[in-house]
Structure formats: C-alpha cells, structure tokens
Image (cartoon, grey):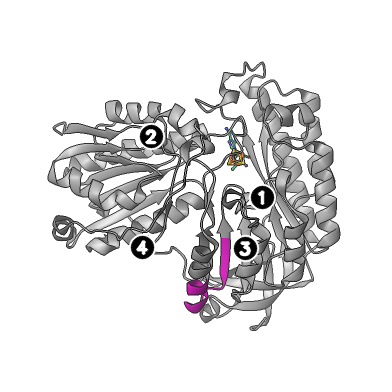
Amino acid sequence: MADLKLNITEKPDLDKARSRVRQEIPVVRDEIVVPERLIQFAQGKKYFIRTYGCQANVRDEENMRGLLELTGFTSVDDEKLADFVIINTCAIRENAEDKVFGELGILKGLKAIKPEMLIAVSGCMVQQTHIVDTITQKYRHVDLMFGTHNIHHLLELLDEAITKKTRVVNVPSKYGEIVENMPSKRNHRFKAFVNIMFGCDKFCTYCIVPYTRGKERSRLMDDVIKECKELVTQGYQEITLVGQNVNSYGKDFKNGTTFAQLLEAVALTGIPRLRFMTSHPWDFTDEMLDMIAKYDNIMNHIHLPFQAGDDMILRLMARRYTVASYLELVKKMQTKIPQLTLTTDIIVGFPNETEAQFQGTLDLVEKVKFDATYTFIYSPRKGTPAHKMLDNVPYEEKQKRFYRLKELVDRIAKEKSDTMVGQTYTVLVDGVSKHNPDKLSAYTESNKLVHFKGDAALAGKLVRVRIDEANTYTLFGSLIDDQA
Ligand code: 5AD
Ligand code: SF4
C-alpha cells in the first residue's frame, strides 16, 4: 500500500484542553452542507461504525450515522463488507485503547485486500497528542482522524480525504461549543439517549474526560425539551438524559436553572420512562430527590459512583466528598425514595492504596448493598495529575484486590436479585433475546435484565412479569399481564 500524504490541519493540545478561562459558549445551529462529490462517491457504498465507551460516544455514533446517511452511504454490520469504517474510541482506561490498536491491526489486513477501503478513527482517544502521533506514524492505513468537537464536520473532512487523496488529521482541542441541528440515526427504536450537557469540569485526578471533551456546558432547556417531545411523538418509551455529571446541568447559565427543573419538564412530556446518568455524589440536591419522588415516570434508580471507600484516597482523587457524607446522602435518598435502587462505579488500586484503605471500599459496598457495581483497576492516564503520582502497589496486588471486590459485589447483586423472586414487576420489552430466540428480553425499573416467554410483538411495550428465578445479573420470569 503506497503511503498517502499527511495533512494535519489541527492537532490536539493538552494545555488547551485543560484551560478553563471564562469564555462565551457558542450554540452552533449551522445547516449541514453535504459536499456534492461525496454524494456521488457514496452511491452504493457502505459504512460501518464500531463504538467503544460511554453514552456520549453512543450518541456521537448516532450523529455520525445521521450525517453519513445524508450522502447515500448505507449501514452494514460487518466491517469486511464496508467501504468506510469508523472506529469511535474511548480513552478512559488503557484496555479500551489496547482494543482499538488491536482492531486497527485487523483493519490493516482488510485494507491490504481491499485498498479502496477508507478508515477513520474518532472519539476520545484521538483527543490525546501521543495517540495521534502513534497512529500517524505506525498505523499509516488510517485515512482520517477527527475528534469529539468536530463531528459536525465529518462530511467535509471525509470529502477532503477522498478528493485530495491525503490522510487527514483534524482534532481540535477546544473549550467547546454546543452543536444543535445535527442529523441523527438512533440505534434503538424506543429507548433514546438525550445529551443535556457536554464536557466536565470536575477534574477528578485519575480522569481523562475533562481533557477529551472540554468544558462543562449545558444545552438550552428548550432544545432538550424539543428533542424529548419529538421522541415522545415518535413513540419512544424511554429517555435517558446523559451528561458526565447531570447534577451540574444549568449552572453555567448562571440564572438559577437546575437539573431538577429540567427533570420535571422532561417528565411532563409524558415519556413513560425517564432515566438520567451520571450523578456526582458531591452536588446531588434535595430538589432532585423531590422530583424523582414526585413523578412516577422518573425511574427510582440512581447511578452514584463512589470510586473509593477511604477519605484520604477520595481526597487524592479530588472527589469532594467523604465516606461519611456519601453514606449520609445514600440514607437521605433511601428515606425519600423507599423503592430506590443504587448502582455505582469503583476504582481499585489508586496509587499507594493500602490494604486498610481497600478494606474501606469493601466495607462501603457491604453497607450500601448496590444493585450493580462497575469495578475497574486504576489505569494511569497521561496528562492527568494522578499519572504523576508514584505508586508502590504492584499490579498483581491490584488484580487480587479487584477479584476480591468482584466476588463481594457479585454476592450482593445475587442476594438482591434473589429478593425479587416471586414478585411482579413492570418491565419494558426490548425484543427477542439475542441468546435465546424462544425468549424475550426486558428491563425492570432498576434496569435489571429479565427473560421470559412472550410474543415478539410485545417489543416496545411495558408489561407485567413475575420473577421465577434469579442469576446474579439476569432474571427469569413469566408474563402476568401484557399491559402495565
Ligand atoms: N482508571 C480506572 N477507572 C477509571 N474511571 C475513570 N477513569 C479511570 C481510570 N483512569 C472509571 C470511574 C468512572 C468510570 C466511568 O470509569 O469509575 O466513574
Ligand atoms: Fe471523570 Fe470525575 Fe468528570 Fe466523572 S466527574 S467524568 S470521573 S472527571
């Protein structure tokens, strides 16, 4: 494969990404221009997108799909059949990045057989200078790199790569803007993610997100509500409002707008199920709890990452709460919302974590009894403050702690699931189970997966199901009523 010329128009810059000087946040409402040559190029051509990471990335993928389909490109499920492949990446941990490099290796082989295949890398990974350098030097079969801030320019950048026959790198590090009016092709027929804000200003010391996604900035309430109303009209059954820390919604408007007000306005659209994530334990308000308690269509489920069960580690992580204040918040939540289910994220093996500090994490898990816990081994991220901390804990010890924690969270999740046996719940039917064509898959209010026998036509409906049997993370039940 002959090397194409490299055209770097913008490269990510960590210092720029870190900057939080006060600046106006523009709301961009430009019309999307579809380059004429791209329309001709895309005729009969297929695209494939693989997304890693969080809901923000999933939503970005949906926008990319919307854009590409304006040109005539159609979607394909198998990358081998694609003319244009996008790998939409996550930078939160090293193993997410390793998977992408593995995938790029496979794509190199595919491109050797099919040289006209175009390959793009997008998302959080390429917002880091060292990753852009590695890809331009060692993965020369990648034709295009664009970031989290310029998805709306995808068509122009692709057009440039095609017409100028160059490898294009355009990854600005920005304070950020709000881009409205982006076309979107959603991945799910009746469950939708709706962005309410972008970026993050918390700067937890281990986390790369504030650098890859820019300043915390909220979408205007009117724009969010308009999108939600359209989803209700289209028959959507569930909306999840997404942001790195939804509690911060509206603070940047400096006019008293709060997340609780937005939550109420979305609940009033009549969407049958309303969720939100993620919430930081530091600025979770009573007003939010009151809203959850007030509206039946706001699900009684809060994802409340605690990360570590030790005050010193929490301070080193810059999390702004203590074990005691976290437990106090949990108690308040459970008092105001008796049916509440809680889920969390935990990091094991933060630099210099002692056995006693790790024990604090186990104790907290035992006390709160989360319905589901997402556990991670700490992964140093270049450019973050924690990356510079010397670490005296060997990786094998971190792995051992990880497995000890995993055993505990699985035991508790199983106990929680067991308490559901014999009870009847309202579930939203997703469709036929991917693993068993005789069964349907559905989700409870707490987002637990339930399998039961039923007609495929129930997909998208809220029905009543009795739980007969429980595995740790999957329930098995029987249909009691095909209407909730
Ligand atoms: N290493 C391990 N886990 C991390 N997370 C964020 N950054 C890191 C990191 N450097 C975890 C946190 C967060 C979740 C989305 O990912 O637990 O809540
Ligand atoms: Fe990362 Fe902390 Fe922001 Fe979450 S709140 S995205 S963990 S910096």
Q: Vertically, is 139 above or below 41?
A: above
Q: CA distance from mark 1 to mark 4?
A: 28 Å
Image quarter hosting the C terminus = bottom right
Residue at which label 3 appears: 262
Q: CA distance from mark 3 to mark 1?
A: 14 Å
Q: Quadrant of ligand 1?
A: top right
Under mark 3, the amino acid is Leu
Q: Nearer the viewer, residue 13 or 23?
A: 23
Q: Nearer the viewer, residue 47 or 241?
A: 241
The magenta-colored residue range is 229-240
**Location of residue 83 in the rendering, given as x and y in whole percent from the top left corner:** 22, 52
**Location of residue 87 in the rendering, given as x and y in whole percent from the top left corner:** 36, 45
Q: CA distance from mark 2 to mark 3?
A: 40 Å
**Location of residue 93 in the rendering, given as x and y in whole percent from the top left corner:** 53, 35
Residue at which label 2 appears: 101
Secondary structure under the numbered disc 2 in the rendered image: helix
Q: Residues within 10 Å of mark 3 (few under 14, many from 20)?
A: many
Q: CA distance from mark 1 to mark 2?
A: 31 Å
